[in-house]
Image (cartoon, rainbow, N blue to C red):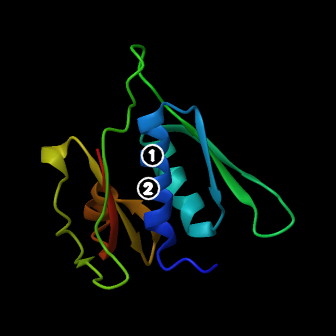
């Protein structure tokens, strides 16, 4: 079965796993998903991710992060650019998410990065999602 929007599928699987209180979630691996998870890990929203080979494309095992009282660190995920409606931001014009409390994840010619990094490098690109 082909998937029309694998990034939206990644975000939905993470959201559903957080709602049920799971420690980890498994998704089909791709390089873009790995880079998105690396940004989430670097920013402290997830504990980590690793690729588990399965003889095909591999599986991405994402370890979710919770606070000491058991609530998830990730409060929300929103897909911005969709296959039917792409959203681009010019260099330096990436708007802050939730008044600076969240991050936006962009794919640029310099790779996948946060909105803050894109503003610093004056790099524009496609706004993939927002996380808070």
Q: Residues within 10 Å of mark 2 (few under 14, many from 20)?
A: some
Q: Quadrant of residue 71?
A: top left
Depicted 122 relative to depicted 59: above or below:
below
Residue placed at 37% from the left, 38% from the top? 74
The quadrant in which the C terminus is found is: top left
Extreme residue in the right direction: 55
SS at mark 2? helix
Q: Please give the residue where the numbered disc 2 appears in the rendered image.
A: 12
Residue 49: image quadrant is top right
**Residue 127's spot in the image, x, y percent?**
31, 70
Q: How many marks?
A: 2
Visible in this render: residue 15? yes
Residue 60: percent from left, percent from top: 66, 54
Location of mark 1 (residue): 16
In-front residue for pair 64/13: 13
| Residue situated furthest bottom in the rendering | 84
- Marks 2 and 1: CB-CB under 8 Å? yes
Q: At x 46% / y 72%, what residue is drawn?
A: 110
Which class describes the residues within 10 Å of circle 1: few (<14), some (14-19), or many (20+)?
Answer: few
- The quarter of the rendered structure image containing the N terminus is bottom right
- The reply to whether residue 45 is in sight is no
> Is residue 120 positioned above or below 21 on the image?
below
Please give left or right for residue 47 compared with residue 120 in the image: right
């Amino acid at each position: 079965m082909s998937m029309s929007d694998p990034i939206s599928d990644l975000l939905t699987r993470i959201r559903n796993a957080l709602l049920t209180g799971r420690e980890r979630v498994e998704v089909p691996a791709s390089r873009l998903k790995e880079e998105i998870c690396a940004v989430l890990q670097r920013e402290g929203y997830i504990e980590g991710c690793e690729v588990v080979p399965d003889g095909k494309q591999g599986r991405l095992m994402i370890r979710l992060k919770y606070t000491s009282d058991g609530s998830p660190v990730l409060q929300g995920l929103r897909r911005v650019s969709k296959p039917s409606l792409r959203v681009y931001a010019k260099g330096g014009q990436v708007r802050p998410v939730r008044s600076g409390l969240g991050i936006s994840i962009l794919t640029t010619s310099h790779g996948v990065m946060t909105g803050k990094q894109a503003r610093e490098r004056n790099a524009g690109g496609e706004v993939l999602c927002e996380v808070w």
